[in-house]
Image (cartoon, rainbow, N blue to C red):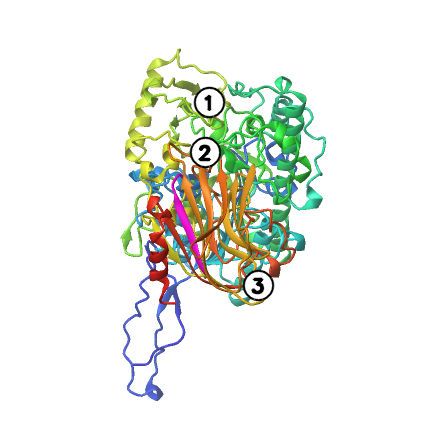
Amino acid sequence: MTRPTQETPVTDLDRTHLPHSGVRPAYEPAVDLRDQTEPLPSRPRLEAPEGAPNVLVILIDDMGFGASSAFGGPCRMPAAEALADNGLRYSRFHTTALCSPTRQSLLTGRNHHAVGMGTVLEISNGTPGYDGMRPPTAGTLAQALSGNGYATAAFGKWHQTPPWEQTAAGPFDRWPTREGFDHFYGFLAAEASQFEPLLVDDTTFVDPPSTEAEGYHLSEDLVDRVGEWVTDVRTHAPDKPWFAYLAFGATHAPFQVPKDWRDRNRGDFAHGWDAQREITLAKQKALGVVPEDAELAPWTPGIPHWDELDDVQREVAERLMELYAAFAEHTDEQVGRLVEQLRATGELDNTVVLYILGDNGASAEGGLEGTLNEALRFNAVEDTAERIATQLDKLGGPETYAHYPAGWAVALDTPYQWTKQVASHYGGTRNGLIAHWPAGVDEPGGVRHQWHHVNDVFPTVLELAGVPVPTSINGVAQDPLDGVSFAPTLRSADAPETHHTQYFEMFGNRGIYHEGWTAVTQHKTPWLIHHPDTSMADDVWELYDTRSDWTQAHDIAAEHPDKLAELQALFLAEARRNHVLPMDDGVIGKRMDADKAGRRQSPLTSIVLPPTARNLREDVVPNVKNASHAVRARIEVPDSGADGVLVAQGGGFGGWSLYVLEGHLTYAYNFGALEVTHVRADVPLKPGAHVVEVRSAYDGGGLGRGASLTLVVDGEPVGEGRLERTIPFFFSMDQALNVGLDRGTPVSPDYARTARTTAERGFAFTGRIHDVRIDVGEDALAASTDELFRATLVAH
């Protein structure tokens, strides 16, 4: 049989079952090709409909409705303004109040609990709505477009692959390149250093292409990569439409910008957050994104007013907000670079750009005074304005992991109340959306007031692409979408409103929208570290008629008890249908403990790692926190001596490292960048083979207690030290465990920032490492473990 080498595009195939089977039509071949008079059919393939637009979805992290100048906010974002002035602003677009849930809802078109993403992956539990495991019955937007002839790629923050699946063992089903994207370049975690991110290229962990000293910044790198990918696609397929998903790490903590951006907004926020709300509301009315009669929602309880702060608190709050604004503005400049590339190459006119200004409301996770290290709060430690004030000259650089105070979050959610995590109120869920498509928008500069949700992006994009919602993907029947298309609103401001009902829930903060009414109850306060243990049955519900009260400013629950009861019943019905129940309000504490939460993690209490082990998240290695443990490495020191990291976990804002410095075995324990404890061997290592160890005897009696440390070389103690406290929950949300170097932010100042070039990065060990073994439990400290260690490694 003759095997054709060219594929045959088809125009009349069922697009609802993806991917297309590619079965050749029946044909009758001649015996001899010389006698073949009819063309031989090749394997058919689906192409995108003729004229289908490119699609660019841009998602900003942790940006409130009232942050961007495009929606009246103080952060100057000219690229967003230009896209809005030549496209459309959506004034009633909503997210889920948290990052992973919003992303999963965006890419699947379903409600977040319905696809297992009721919270972020790092604190998931084993219940159906919160297990972090997207089911195959909820295919992705990328799968739908790829199956219909689009080139697809994702760049930046992913935060949808369970941490326990981020190893060479997989499975890879929930990695971007198995969820419909041809290519991925970005990071898998919740956040990333802008200078030293833990990057992935498709399924391979890679280092950033340069260092901060060489001009590296993650946001700039991501836009460069998008531009290169689009160019490559167009070079090889001039008529093929593409879908690019660009999810910045900005403006999530850490607030980090290039040096020449750090002082650009000096003095711009001296008026404080109360005054900023008034300024922003006036601008929002002028833009038409809120009505003229809109009122500021009540001040969020528990947050001090600006005039209640002392001088140090005001100075710190002002500087942190200046930094955030610079971060937002720098990010928008990168968006502007990408837009200009598309314009210059003729791509922009037929590219649908959806610029989503926030995956939730502005973040209050910096606490009431802000922080130099966001990870402190995840470990139940408060920062203080007094400490921050001593390091203001470092803000924006790699030495800080900064976040502003909660008061600025309230101001950046103007005109609404509450913040990120508070899914009950619009301060947590309402975000700005800009739609730009010169070939498809009839009223440039218009505002659309139809009520929509992030789950509407999926059906909207498919309608604009001219393809149906798939009924099966990879042979699996698909669940119905929860989202509805807002494509008609691109053509007409008078398009009917189609999203009539939507529930919200996050950490027990919950509510329901139904045809203009909202019934809501705030349960959990995001900036509190120690939450009162209150039953959800005791929560007080509020009722708002947003047809006349745009900003949820007037609670009318007392006047309309029957309406409130009706909406409460509707919430429970939606909650049952979407696997919201049982609700879990735990954040710091039970949910941080994988065993108590029921979250998957490594069952191992002992592991032997090869010298090539890299980028292992905390969930996939033995948990050394809150337990006695030992770390042992089998190494060889050459005659010339050796220095460098043997194994390190975490990074410069929390973690530990076992390394050799000037020949001396050293252990460093970094407690949230508040203090770094070093234990050093009394004598240097001699050339030859050694087993080097650190033994940590945990005090016990609770979480985060102290430990006694002993350094051991070839069975003999060579150094001792003491930790008065240890990290109880997370070393790092973005850094991992590495053997042979400290990849990412350095744990110890002994070798911090010594790498000025890519070749010097990581303080890599210059001798030879055979293996590293980690053992957890009291038995790990026993002398007999030495023999066990040697026996298991003798094969080398």
Please name the amino acid that badge 2 sits on: Ala
Q: Which residue is mark 2?
A: 97
At 37% across and 47% down in the image, what residue appears? Answer: 781
SS class of the residue under badge 3? loop
Residue 19 is at least partly visible in this image:
yes
Say which quarter of the image contains residue 275.
Answer: top right
The location of residue 129, given as percent across then percent down, is: 32, 38
Question: In terms of depth relative to the viewer, which is nearer, 325 or 494?
Answer: 325
Q: Quadrant of the N terminus?
A: bottom left
Please name the amino acid that badge 3 sits on: Gly
Q: Main secondary structure of the magenta part?
A: strand
Q: In the image, is residue 631 part of the stretch drawn in magenta?
A: yes
Q: Which residue is mark 1?
A: 547
- Viewed as shown, does residue 214 lie left or right of 669? right
C-alpha span from label 3 to label 2: 53 Å
Residue 161 is at least partly visible in this image:
no
Above/below status of 272 relative to 725:
above
